[in-house]
Structure formats: C-alpha cells, structure tokens
Image (spheres, rainbow, N blue to C red):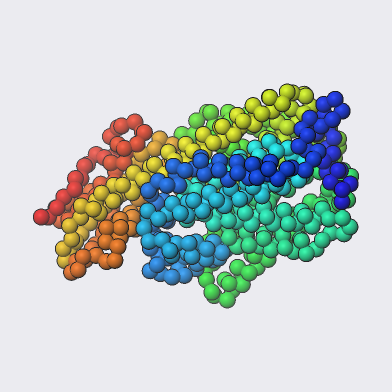
Amino acid sequence: MGEARSDRRDSGRSLGRKLKGRPANLAMTRAITRKGLWLWIAVLCITPLAVYWQTVFQDYGFRDDYSLLREAHEEPFKLFRITTANGRPIYGAVLEASLRPLRFIGDLPWLRLLAVGLLAAVAAVLWRQLRRAGWSDLEAGAVALGVALLPGAQITVGWAIAWPIALALLFAVVGFSVAEAGLRRAGSVHVPSLLLGGTFYFLAGLTYQSSAMFATVPLAAVLLLRSDRERLSHLRWIALHLGTLLASLFAAFLLIQLFFDEGIVMEAARMRLEPEPFTKLLWFVRQPLVNALALFELRDRFNTTAFFWVVAAAIGALLSLGYFYGAKTRSQKLRWLFCVLFLPFVAHAVSLAASSQAVGYRTVLGLSGLVLVLVVFALRSVIATRKLRPAFEVSAFASLFVVAALSAHHNAYQLIAEPQAREWGLIQDAAKKLRFDADTDVYIIRPDIDDRSTEQVFDDEFGSLSSDADWASREMFKDALRERFPDHLPSGSSLSIITGPTPPPSPSAYDEVVDLRKLRREGDRPLSTSAGEATTASTASRR
C-alpha cells in the first residue's frame, strides 16, 4: 500500500515539479497535517459564504420560488409529481420537505444558505480527492473553490428552489471518491466500493441528472496525474469508473421509465431522446461548450460582447499548454487528449441525449468544472516545466481566485438578488396599500424583457424577470398578501387578480393597478421610452 502511494505521488514525472533533485512542493511528499487539513476545510467553507452572503440574505424570491412555496403547503406532493415526471423524484421530495417549514418569502434565505453549505461540502470533498491524487494544496484549492464559484453554482445559490442541484453534485463527488477508494485498494478491485459509489451516482441521477455527470471532473483530475505504474491500467481504470457511472444512471432511467409505464406520473417532454443528434452536436459546440470555456464570464442573451469571445478563445488556447508542457510521454498525451476530446461529451451527455436544448448554466456545471481542471493543469504544467518561482504560482492561482470571487459576487447579487428584490419590492408595496372589500380587484401590468432593470441578461437565469409570466405575477402578489395577512384575508373580503402586458381599458374599475414596467427606471439600464412604457397607468382606486 505504501508503495502504491509512493507511485501516485511520483506519477507523471514530467508533470511534477523538481528542484535540485527534490519536489518543490514538500506538501506533495508527506501527509497533510491535521492542522493544515482543517485550515483548508475552513477556507473552503468560509469563502463561498463570504462571496454569496449578500445574495443569501437579500429579501426576494425567484420565479418558481413563489408558486412552490405555496404549493408545498396547499397542494401536497404536487411538486414531487412534477419533478418525477422530469426524472427527478429525489429533487421534488427533498425540496418539498425543505419548503414545508417555511411560510414566507423572507424565509427563503435558509434554502440559499443550505445551497452554499452543500457547495462548500462539494469543494471540501473534491479538494481532498485531488490532494490524494497528487495535486498540491494550492492547485486542489483552486479547482475546488473555482467549482463553488462557477456561474452554475451562482444560480444554484441565487435560486432558492435550486439547492437540490448542489445535493446532486455532492452525491456525484462522493460517489467518485468511494469508487476510487475501491480501485486503489491492493489486490483485486473492491466490488462493494464500486456498488456503493454507484449507489451515490444513482441518487445523483434521481436528483438532477446533469449534476450526476459532474463525476467527470474528479475523474479528469485524477487521470491526468495517474502513474503508468499503477496496478490498474489507465484503460481499465477509466472503463470501471465510467462503467459504474453510466450503469448507475441507466438504472435510474429504468426506474423512472417504470413509473411512466405504470402510470404513476406522466412523462415530461424533455424525457424523450433527441431525434436529431447531429443538429444537437452543432448546438453543443455553439452554446454549452463555448459558455463553459468562458468559465466565469457570462454570455448575454441579446448582446454578447467581444470580451466574452476573447475570454473563451484565450482559455481555449491556455488549455493547449497542458499538452505542450504537461504531456511528455505517449501515455500522458493520450490521457490529456481523452480529457479534452472525449470527456466534454460525457460531462454533457444528459443534455445531449435529452430532446430539449437547455442552455442554462445550471446544466453545464460538469462541463465548466472539467474546463477548470484543464486550466489549472495547464498552469501547473507551465510552472513546473519552466521552473518558475513559487511566488509566481501563488500569484497565478490567487488571480484566478480573485476573478472567480468577484464575478460570483457580482453575478449572484447584481444579476439575481438585486433585480429580483426590485420586482418583489414593487409587489410588496402594492399589497401593503391594498384596501379590501367584498369584491377586491387587482390588475397587474406585467413587464416584458425590455423593461428589465439589468443591462445583462441570460436565458431564464441572470438578469431575467419573474413577474413577466402571468402565473408568476399572481403568485408573487399572493405571497405578499400572505406576509400581510398570515392566516387569511380580512373577513368578508374576496380577491381577484388579473394580469396583462398592457394597461387595462378602464383603470378605475380596479381597486389597484400595479405597473411593473417601472422596473426599467430602477436599475442600471439607460433610461429610454420603450413600447411598454408608452402608456403609463398609475395606481387607481374606485374609492
């Protein structure tokens, strides 16, 4: 066992740093002290909380947050049926259980805090796995913290009901770690460890299928540094890992198909397989792959800047340095090519197989994490081969962390929490002023995308609106009234809510007209008169 560990630490001799015949990073040649271990775990846990603090404790909800908070109390198991129809029964079960103790939108920070805690756990498990594989503390920390700050992680924190995505990520990294422990044992492969690892993959697949593919991130990180002297050949090692992952996900798929066949739930459209695979591959290259390559730089729905494309191209070029500086032997070159040319398709396999073309960052966490591993590997290889000073290494990874942290804070707060809080604030103000009678009518003028308060917007995530949908604006107003009247509406009163994209023909016919198009004037967008603002409807009362 000791010899095996020594082999792993000496893996990829051209990839390790040598200085005067000895490894430059002494931490790679001796066990991590308990003090150092707890110090890194503290960093990995505290950093995401510090970055996302403002987002977590801002008072707001985000689209489905409003409806699901009510449905968890008034329509039990509806959420579970909806998520099961999409192949995610665990997602619905744990989310519904977490929503039932909550009553108001002001309680949602607890779910966002839970997402941060789970992402910190993912970072800690990933860091520990990379350290065991031969990455230095700093390199492993750069990957682990970077994963917790990716755009997909930002939306997982900013969208309260998205916290099970982080749970699925944790299942995936734990599953890999357990399976890898079984493959590292002396003697034959430890089958129980593979079965237990597969069980975690199975749970991840039933929680959020795309997140289960996050296992490709530690797989790539370990493979790049594996020694050719390991007991298992690289090919067999890859086959066992990917075989366990794919077999577990196939078992989860069969279970969901059984639910459909037995009529327990109706199959959602997105569960069907992609009928045009070649068109899907072209979409993959143009959308998810490019978005993942840009790492922390966001794409824009309407006006993607040249800077985004420069960042994506620069990172793509940086990845190639891993081949030229880090892959010296034929085995190392083949492993790098496998990680670059094959694993991206595995990391995004769920979305490639599904009939929908989802471009949200929450679906590309595995792909983005893979790019991050390759970036850190390239930096590691250049520093080792060029024998650069330790100060340069620290500066390089510190710069990567600063960019990631600043981007994560900005995107999560200024493109999710703050604009959503503006929408929620307008609804709250209207609900507080509403005077009830036996027949209370409210009309909400919904905003469209041109009325958004942020300049940047991407898909249904960053900078998007909640109240532009009829059902969402209704649910928002109901939640605001629930905060004002926790038990029930005033005795003898009734409420009717109507929404529309334009002002009502007769505003005086309503007790309250709420114009949400004013969002445009509250954000960072240039002020100009849009079509939606051509006619202004002020709050009107029949009294």
Q: Is residue 389 left or right of residue 431?
A: right
Examine the rendered structure and indicate whether residue 253 appears above or below residue 133: below
Q: Nearer the viewer, residue 28 or 232?
A: 28
Residue occupying image coordinates x 28% and y 34%: 529
Q: Is residue 26 visible?
A: yes
Q: How many marks?
A: 0
Q: Residue at the far bottom: name it.
A: 262
* Quarter of the figure that contains the C terminus: bottom left
Q: Nearer the viewer, residue 457 or 117?
A: 117
Q: Nearer the viewer, residue 454 or 127?
A: 127
| Residue 242 coordinates in the image, percent (x, y) | 74, 54
Looking at the rendering, which quadrant does residue 314 occupy? top right
Q: Is residue 347 visible?
A: no
| Residue 381 coordinates in the image, percent (x, y) | 75, 31
Looking at the rendering, which quadrant does residue 248 occupy? bottom right
| Residue 439 coordinates in the image, percent (x, y) | 17, 64
| Residue 490 coordinates in the image, percent (x, y) | 21, 65
Q: Residue at the far front: name it.
A: 35
Q: Is residue 490 left or right of residue 239?
A: left
Q: Nearer the viewer, residue 168 or 98?
A: 98
Residue occupying image coordinates x 81% and y 38%: 29
Residue occupying image coordinates x 51% and y 40%: 51
Examine the rendered structure and indicate whether residue 181 appears above or below residue 151: below
Residue occupying image coordinates x 66% and y 49%: 125
